[in-house]
């Protein structure tokens, strides 16, 4: 199977800004891809673009990995982990709620990354969007 083009990779995730609540939403729409490092770079570019366009504001982030199932997805490679840790360290991001459903491997990887970045109190994992949004609003 050939590596996906940038456009094909962009079609596998969605980043949006909820301006009313100052939340950056990231949802993964497809997980079975070959070029996960490039997708992570595209995710980072998209989020950094939002942050740069709103440089005087801070945001919360809502990351939806729920459809990923039991795979470790984009966090499997060292380069992808490095990119996600760099995103977690962004000063404009206050809290990050991660929606994850029954994926112990991915949950362990995320917990390690939050400890390494010193963000354990600002990053929490939830089973659904309602719980995640309730925590962000606190």
Image (cartoon, rainbow, N blue to C red):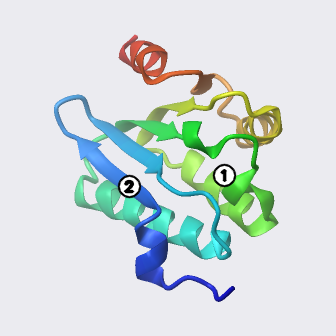
**Marks 2 and 1, how far apart in space?**
19 Å
The residue positioned 44% from the left and 40% from the top of the image is 93
- The spot of residue 127 in percent (x, y) is 58, 21
Left or right for 56, reference 117: left
In the image, residue 1 above or below residue 20:
below
Left or right for 121, reference 70: left
Of mark 2 and mark 1, the one earlier in the sequence is 2
Q: Is mark 2 on a helix, strand or loop?
A: strand
The residue that mark 1 highlights is 85
| Residue 125 picture quarter | top right
| Residue 106 picture quarter | top right
> Crowding at label 1, few (<14), some or many (≥20) Cα neighbours within 10 Å?
some
Q: Is mark 1 on a helix, strand or loop?
A: helix
- The spot of residue 57 in percent (x, y) is 27, 42
Residue nearest the viewer, comparing 56 with 120: 120
Q: Do the residues labelled 2 and 1 touch (CB within 8 Å)?
A: no
The residue positioned 73% from the left and 39% from the top of the image is 110
- The spot of residue 124 in percent (x, y) is 61, 24
| Mark count | 2
Label placed on residue 14: 2
In the image, residue 53 above or below residue 111:
below
The residue positioned 42% from the left and 70% from the top of the image is 10
């Amino acid at each position: 199977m050939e590596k996906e083009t940038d456009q094909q990779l962009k079609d596998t995730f969605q980043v949006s800004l909820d301006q009313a609540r100052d939340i950056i939403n990231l949802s993964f729409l497809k997980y079975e891809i070959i070029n996960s490092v490039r997708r992570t770079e595209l995710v980072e570019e998209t989020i950094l673009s939002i942050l740069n366009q709103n440089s005087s504001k801070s945001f919360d982030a809502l990351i939806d990995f729920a459809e990923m199932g039991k795979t470790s997805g984009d966090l499997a490679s060292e380069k992808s982990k490095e990119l996600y840790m760099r995103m977690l360290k962004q000063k404009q991001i206050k809290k990050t709620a991660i929606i994850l459903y029954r994926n112990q491997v991915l949950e362990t990887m995320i917990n390690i990354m939050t400890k390494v970045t010193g963000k354990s109190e600002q990053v929490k994992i939830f089973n659904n969007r309602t719980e995640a949004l309730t925590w962000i609003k606190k």
